[in-house]
């Protein structure tokens, strides 16, 4: 049985217990959320996961780090270094998006070394092979694609992105649209390309039942990809994007009916005042399925700093109910991230998630803020560092003034120290 | 006549013309906003400013960088290096908050080298002198404080923070409050300390007319300080903070009546779901006076990354109507910032301000996003870099794949490139 199947039958699995404990929630509450499709517990039957997390409503916001090689930068060692950086920074999930080097070796190494859930985009495998042989991507063999998909599921991948929401309709709708960037989704554009050249429906949509059968077999959570996510704030919340979301909502229902756990991927590049609407739309159109956001970036003009831009959008989205933030690194739009970029990306996304958790009713989220603030009141630097999201980074920057009590920012003219003169403690 | 006086009389000053041009707005519109107290144009009569900016409703969000020495880190050279870093990163304003070394020399150097408006907190001067002589701060001589204030105004400081909103009432209210951190404002805590020990009213409040006379003489804009700003998300929007804001609203009105330009300083540490309320409250209680925010930080747990945390809060605040963002650097809460910290802080605040400008109706703000996105569609890297908020940083990270057309993030499996196969251009 899948986690969803057990949850529906009232069974609290050992995995649910562990994930509930990690979040400090009641296992029965988590079971109910999973049964209702409002939370997922990605864990492949064939994958041992050291630290289990559930994702969804009523739980803390989770963070994913995209790692993986590209054609221009490919080595197992590099990817393991990125995995380690992501884990050290506190990610709850990693996705192996490799498209360069020995994909099988990289995937196996990540599956072996990751203490947290691992996701992939299976279509990248066949696309990479075709590209290497200089065969146009629209020659992709559908059976081979499904074989890849099943292989990755059998190997233990916990969740997979399936771009089942781009269809022949999407191509028509794109023609009628004045989108600046037709698609910024690799998976989505591979399938649109295939559809355009073959005049056939997206196999991941047409044969969605096959996808569900495979996912069910290994209890792989489906992450319904957003091939039509906007690639600029000017394209946000447009007709192609929203039509895809409507379709994803229907497919999500089909998945749940077949006891397959499902989450929905979302934009992307979204202006500040449309983020909340995007979250509410997803929750409504997809019956409360967990929402997995890439960013969103509320401006396009900050390459080199997109982890900051994404933290802005991610915090607003998560506060509005988004459940899972895919990090964005400072390298986004410019190069494959290195381990330090990965680290910075995870920290920024965790800050966004925590700021949201304080206000979205996550139990005890604000206690960390209370503790660090009490330590600040007491000028207890060890305490402050211990509660910091990144104690090592904070320690590196800490510089105490001559009194050894205050930091060099204000020195002994420290407001906290001065407060002792006029305020009770 | 002050800029406010001229604006009220229907005169468009040369300074208004320049500031309107910098913002791409009609000079008459700017005049009206200044006359209504909804915008300010900080420029001391005795200070030549190369690049003039106005701050307020209907204008782009402006950014300030706090520089200045502390007792533990003090050199003119270092402060000039920080000034240059702030300017290079595109700040619209700097504040010299020095409390260490030769304050006069640092202030003069900053005034001389800054191409943008310069602000100070005059009370730091006398507090620093007392502290050096190991004289308790509550022995501060009020006449000497006012002399300092006038001296800085006569030297050309364009705006000054005046902590006139903390009063004897504040001390009583603090006693009745369960604030975690009584005050995190240096200026505010200096004055509260003085009041507590002397049992007398805050001279900046009691003698606010004297402040107004001095400010009027040099056309110094008053920035009404928030001594009661929360220092943790747990203290946000509490009674001491809001009572001070009410008082600042009354004082702001008195300033405008005397033809003194005025802005209001705001928090601080504020949970995500209280930020908009704080902006709306300020606008309502202070008759639309420009709002100058420090942060706000929607969580306390990220020392070492508070520029990111502040970007989250600042973007939300500015989108809700805040006009002026005081940057926060990665060194906040840990040490005096170095030039690189200053640079990172300004960039993060500018990203927040720009993301807000897109949605707060700032004319042409989104055109930069449109252009960079068109360049992205065309894989025109020179164009992309030219539109980036920090072209140098973006260029350093840019790494092109073998095809010289796509970056190494996705390599040749680039969605933008693949889009050419199925979408019109």
Image: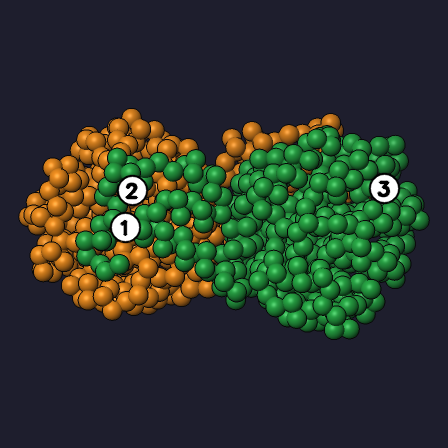
Chain colours: A orange, B green
Q: Is residue A24 left or right of residue A422?
A: left
Q: CA distance from mark 1 to mark 2?
A: 9 Å
Residue found at x 46% / y 64%: A273
- Decide: marks 2, 3 in contact (CB < 8 A)? no
- Residue reaching furthest to the front: B14
User: Given the image, what chain letter belongs to the residue carrying mark 1?
Assistant: B
Secondary structure state at the residue bearing disc 3: helix
How far from the left and from the top, in percent, is residue B103? Answer: 80, 37
Residue B344 in which image quadrant: top right
Q: Which residue is mark 3?
A: B126
Badge 2: residue crowd in 10 Å (few <14, some 14–19, many ≥20): many
Residue carrying label 2: B406
> SS at mark 2?
loop
Where residue A195 sits in the image (x, y, percent)? 13, 57
Q: Earlier in the sequence, mark 1 or mark 3?
A: 3
Which residue: 36% across, 51% down?
A: B375
- Whether B301 is drawn above or below A252: the answer is above
Reading the image, the residue beneath label 1 is B416
Q: Secondary structure at mark 1?
A: helix
Q: Give the label on residue A165, or none.
A: none
**At x 74% / y 73%, what residue is drawn?**
B10
Image quadrant containing the N terminus of chain B: bottom right
User: Gap between marks 2 and 3, in whole Å?
Assistant: 58 Å
Q: Find residue B95 and report its horizontal and vertical position in percent.
A: 70, 46
In the foreground, A297 or B221 = B221
- Disc nearest the viewer among 1 and 3: 1
- B343 or A219, which lies in front? B343
Q: Is residue B375 left or right of residue B79?
A: left
Q: Are marks 1 and 3 in contact (CB under 8 Å)?
A: no
Q: Chain of mark 2?
A: B
């Amino acid at each position: 049985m899948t986690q969803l199947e057990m949850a529906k039958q009232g069974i609290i699995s050992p995995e649910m217990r562990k994930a509930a404990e990690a979040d400090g929630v009641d296992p029965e509450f988590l079971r109910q959320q999973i049964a209702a499709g409002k939370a997922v517990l990605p864990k492949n039957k064939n994958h041992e996961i050291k630290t289990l997390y559930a994702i969804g409503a009523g739980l803390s916001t989770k963070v994913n780090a995209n790692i993986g090689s590209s054609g221009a930068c490919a080595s197992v060692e590099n990817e393991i270094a990125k995995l380690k950086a992501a884990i050290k920074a506190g990610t709850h999930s990693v996705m192996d998006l490799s498209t360069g080097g020995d994909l099988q070796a990289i995937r196996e190494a990540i599956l072996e070394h990751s203490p947290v859930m691992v996701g992939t985009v299976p279509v990248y495998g066949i696309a990479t092979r075709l590209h290497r042989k200089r065969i146009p991507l629209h020659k992709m063999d559908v059976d081979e694609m499904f074989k890849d998909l099943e292989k990755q599921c059998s190997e233990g991948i916990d969740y997979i992105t399936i771009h089942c929401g781009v269809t022949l309709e999407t191509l028509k709708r794109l023609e009628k649209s004045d989108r600046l960037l037709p698609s910024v989704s690799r998976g989505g554009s591979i399938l649109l390309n295939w559809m355009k050249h073959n005049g056939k429906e997206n196999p991941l949509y047409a044969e969605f039942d096959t996808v569900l059968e495979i996912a069910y077999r290994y209890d792989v959570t489906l992450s319904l990809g957003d091939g039509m996510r906007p690639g600029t704030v000017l394209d946000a919340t447009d007709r192609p994007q929203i039509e895809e979301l409507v379709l994803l909502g229907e497919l999500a229902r089909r998945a749940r009916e077949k006891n397959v756990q499902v989450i929905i991927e979302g934009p992307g590049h979204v202006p500040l005042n449309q983020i909340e609407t995007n979250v509410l739309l997803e929750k409504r159109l997809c019956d409360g399925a967990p929402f997995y956001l890439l960013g969103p970036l509320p401006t396009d003009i900050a390459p080199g700093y997109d982890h900051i831009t994404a933290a802005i959008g991610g915090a607003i989205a998560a506060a509005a109910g988004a459940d899972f933030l895919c990090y964005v690194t400072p390298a986004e739009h410019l190069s494959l991230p290195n381990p330090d970029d990965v680290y910075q990306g995870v920290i920024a996304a965790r800050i966004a998630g925590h700021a949201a958790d304080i206000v979205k009713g996550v139990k005890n989220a604000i206690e960390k803020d209370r503790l660090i603030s009490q330590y600040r009141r007491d000028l207890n630097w060890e305490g402050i560092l211990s509660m910091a999201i990144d104690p090592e980074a904070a320690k590196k920057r800490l510089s105490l003034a001559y009194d050894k009590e205050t930091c060099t920012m204000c020195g002994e003219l420290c407001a906290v120290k001065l407060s002792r003169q006029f305020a009770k403690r």
